Image (tube, grey):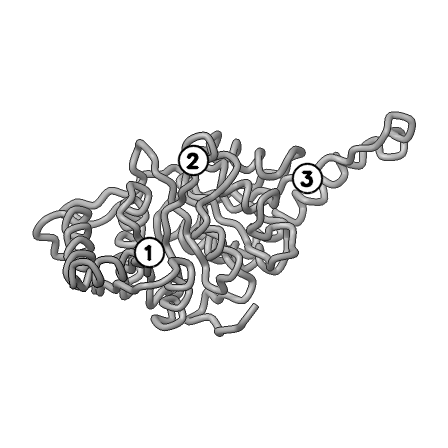
Amino acid sequence: MLTLRSILCAVDFSDQSRYALRWAVALAVRHQSRLTVLTAVDPLLAQAARTRFGLDLPKAEIEPALRDLMTAVLPAMTPWTPVTSIDVRVGDASDVILEAADRERADLIVMGTHGLGGFRKLLLGSTMERVLRRTHTPLLAVPGVDAPLVILDATGPRFEMKTILMATDFSEASINAVRWAADLAERIEVPLVLAHVVTPIVVPARWRSYVEGADEERVAHARVQLEKLSAGLADGVPREVVASIGRPADSIASLAEERRAGLIVMGLIGDRGALAPRPGSIAYRVLCLAQVPVLVVPPRSSSQGVPPRTSR
């Protein structure tokens, strides 16, 4: 069973971070986790406020604003509010987030995604990208969406989604991510879709006969592997397997929309792996394309207690 003792939610007061905070609150309640809500203050801004106005900006304005944000997100008079602390730090946002994750021994980082508008399909925000490149803690990236997938009211948090999509490449990181996806599907009480996308073999026409039928064979093999993964999961999780041919990132995003998934789960490999969080990689493109939150799970994170702290 997945154990989330500590959840870190990094906010910057944007709409995306408000959605991220809703997810963090809901997950903290479901897992009875300690929640830390963190924001980073630009050092130049903090210094200017101190030099020109003698103002300790983090204490005087940022902390009250963070408390106001919590009040705005949580319904009034809720008996189920998670144990929450707020943390305001001066420094580079990605450094602040990663340092806080280690300090709090966080089992999950929750952040809002940026890079919207014309660049939404090409680039994530710089803070998200830097955190992804260096994190050894699972990270939930939450976009701003019109229809909220998490409802917070007096009765407690609930999730408005039809399925969870687990996209796997059968790597160590993906196998570990399957455990996360299955546990979340069981807790949220939605079916799990296990998916693998086979990249088609592209060769010049004169040699096409050599690979004829190869893609279909690879899809069949992937389906067998998916069935094995599915068989190893708890019986209480309804699930289906989907193996297809296409461009992985685009196919994953399309499948999530088709199956009305409220969450995509993927493994996260290091800087040189196929799922590395760099422009052009599968995980990066999924994060840019997806209209729903994406949970990326490093290979060394654990579904049993706190993961070991290792450097990359």
Q: Is residue 101 left or right of residue 39?
A: right
Mark closer to the observer (1, 3): 1
| Residue wearing tag 3 | 198
| Residue wearing tag 2 | 291
Label 1, secondary structure: give it. strand
Mark closer to the observer (2, 1): 1
Q: Is residue 163 above or below residue 267?
A: above
User: Which of the image's four quarters has the N terminus?
Assistant: bottom left
The amino acid pointed to by label 3 is: Val
Q: Which mark is residue 10?
A: 1
- Circle 1 residues within 10 Å: few <14, some 14–19, many ≥20: many
The amino acid pointed to by label 2 is: Gln
Which of the 4 image quarters holds residue 28? bottom left
- Contact between marks 1 and 3 (CB within 8 A): the answer is no
Mark 3 and mark 2 lie on one chain; the one further toward the N terminus is 3
Q: For the residues marked 2 and 1, what is the alpha-carbon distance in whole angstroms?
A: 20 Å
